Image (cartoon, helix red, strand yellow):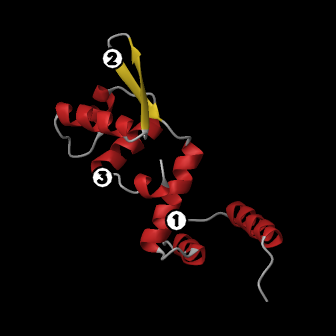
């Protein structure tokens, strides 16, 4: 699936993907029970089929029901979600995203987390020399 295609998920499809990542493998009933503003069970089943057709989910028959799981690794999906977040809210700027996360009043960043972030920044500096 291309980057453009993965951005084409509807709100409901994204909700279903969130549930699948959290609890996979899941049945249609599992998704239906957990989805916000619960649509009909038939709608959930149809959306699961669409996500399989889009290549976002894979399914396997277990007994008399299908179990669904993500077709992509959590890491790959996280990178895609981070890219959407950057593009949607921060105009593609990593700097603005980090400032937004560090500036969130309800989030407390520990000294240990800040140290790990600093180490990641130093590592990134070594990998990408500045353009001067």
Residue at point 41% right, 53% down? Answer: 5
Closer to the camera in the image, 47 or 78: 47
Where's the C terminus, which quadrant?
Answer: bottom right
Number of numbered callouts drawn: 3
Residue at point 59% right, 47% down? Answer: 75
Does residue 124 appear to the left or right of 57 in the view shown?
A: right
Residue at point 47% right, 70% down? Answer: 87
Mark 3–mark 2 Cα distance, whole angstroms, equals: 25 Å
Return the residue at label 2. 65
Closer to the camera in the image, 78 or 7: 7
Give the percent coordinates (x, y) of residue 45: 25, 31
Give the percent coordinates (x, y) of residue 125: 79, 73
Label at residue 107: 1
Give the percent coordinates (x, y) of residue 59: 41, 26
- Mark 3 or mark 2: name the one nearer the start of the chain: 3
Query: Measured along the vertical axis of the image, is residue 76 above or below residue 116?
Result: above
- Discs 3, 2 touching: Cβ within 8 Å: no
Query: Measured along the vertical axis of the image, is residue 71 above or below residue 127?
Result: above
- Mark 1 or mark 2: name the one nearer the start of the chain: 2
Give the percent coordinates (x, y) of residue 28: 30, 28
Does residue 38 appear to the left or right of 106 in the view shown?
A: left
Return the residue at label 3. 10
Kind of element beneath mark 3? loop
Q: Tell me which corner region of the image, top left, top right, bottom left or bottom right, holds residue 95.
A: bottom right
Kind of element beneath mark 1? loop
Mark 1–mark 3 Cα distance, whole angstroms, equals: 28 Å
Residue at point 65% right, 63% down? Answer: 110
Mark 3 neighbour density, 10 Å: few (under 14) some (14–19) many (20 or more): few
Query: Measured along the vertical axis of the image, is residue 124 above or below residue 99?
Result: above
Mark 1–mark 2 Cα distance, whole angstroms, equals: 41 Å
- Mark 1 or mark 3: name the one nearer the start of the chain: 3
């Amino acid at each position: 699936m291309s980057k453009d295609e993965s951005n084409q998920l509807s709100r409901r499809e994204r909700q279903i993907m969130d549930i699948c990542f959290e609890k996979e493998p899941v049945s249609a009933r599992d998704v239906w029970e957990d989805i916000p503003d619960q649509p009909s069970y038939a709608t959930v089943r149809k959306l699961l089929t669409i996500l399989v057709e889009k290549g976002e989910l894979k399914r396997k028959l277990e007994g008399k029901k299908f179990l669904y799981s993500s077709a992509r690794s959590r890491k790959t999906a996280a990178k895609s979600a981070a890219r959407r977040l950057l593009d949607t809210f921060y105009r593609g700027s990593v700097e603005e995203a980090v400032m937004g996360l560090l500036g969130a009043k309800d989030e407390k960043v520990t000294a240990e987390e800040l140290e790990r972030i600093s180490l990641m920044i130093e590592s990134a500096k070594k990998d990408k020399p500045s353009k001067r």
